[in-house]
Structures are given as C-alpha cells and as structure tokens.
C-alpha cells in the first residue's frame, strides 16, 4: 500500500506542476487524468512518469478533481473499482488543491 500511496502523491504533484506551468486545469477529455499528465500538454512537458499511472497491482488510477480537492482512486488488490469510491478494497487518497 505504501507504493500506491507514493504514486498517488506523484499524481497530485504532477497536477500541481501542470497548474503552475499552464495556469489552468487540464482540459476535460475522455482520457484519464493520469494519461493527460503523462503526455505533457501543449508544451509536451511530461509531469508524470509512466510507472506512476498504475497502482501497485497494475490498475490505472482514476482521478477526480472538484471543490478544491483531488481524489486519487486505486482499485486495490482485486483490481476492480467498486461502485462507490473507497468501498471494498479500493483505496482513496485525497489532496487539497487550489
């Protein structure tokens, strides 16, 4: 779980670095947020390493941003996302953002 927690922190830092560089949130697309941060945006600056887009069990993180908070969601050991974040063995990591 420590590895997954560290990766969730890397995602939060990547998002804050994006905001610092571009001055706005990444555009809403059908792409997962971790892919957007990994691809680098208009200036092609990669804010997230390939190894940080998946949790310790090899499942891509889900990221939700709103109300001054970022939630990084891991499917957990069973590699299946629950209907509600944080249920079952899913892991939720919240980070306050501006």
Image (cartoon, helix red, strand yellow):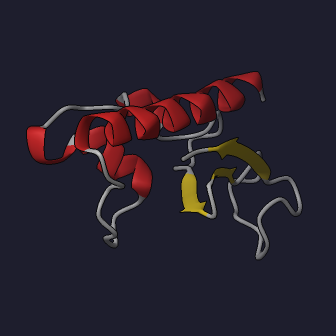
Q: Going 48% across and 32% down the picture, which residue do you hit?
A: 52
Question: Residue at point 13% right, 37% down?
Answer: 44
Residue 31 in the image: above or below residue 54: below
Identify the residue shown where x is 77% and y is 45%: 77
Whether residue 7 is situated above or below residue 91 in the rendered picture: above
Query: What is the x, y in percent for residue 24?
Result: 32, 52
Position of 62 with respect to 23 (left or right) is right
Residue most extreme to the right: 88
Identify which residue, 19 or 80, lies in the foreground: 19
Residue sticking out furthest to the bottom = 83
Given the current orientation, which residue lies at the most extreme left position? 43
Give the side of residue 37 with respect to residue 78, left or right. Answer: left
Name the one closer to the observer, 37 or 82: 37
Q: Quadrant of residue 3?
A: top right
- Residue 72 vs 85, above or below: the answer is above
Q: Position of residue 40 (x, y in %)?
A: 22, 40
Give how far across and how far down residue 39 sits, in percent: 23, 43
Give the percent coordinates (x, y) of residue 70: 61, 51
């Amino acid at each position: 779980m420590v590895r997954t927690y560290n990766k969730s922190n890397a995602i939060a830092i990547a998002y804050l670095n994006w905001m610092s560089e571009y001055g706005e949130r990444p555009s809403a697309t059908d792409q997962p947020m971790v892919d957007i941060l990994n691809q680098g945006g208009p200036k092609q600056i990669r804010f997230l390493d390939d190894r940080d887009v998946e949790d310790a069990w090899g499942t891509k993180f889900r990221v939700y941003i709103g109300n001054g908070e970022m939630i990084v969601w891991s499917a957990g050991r069973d590699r299946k996302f629950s209907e509600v974040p944080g249920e079952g063995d899913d892991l939720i990591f919240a980070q306050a953002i501006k």
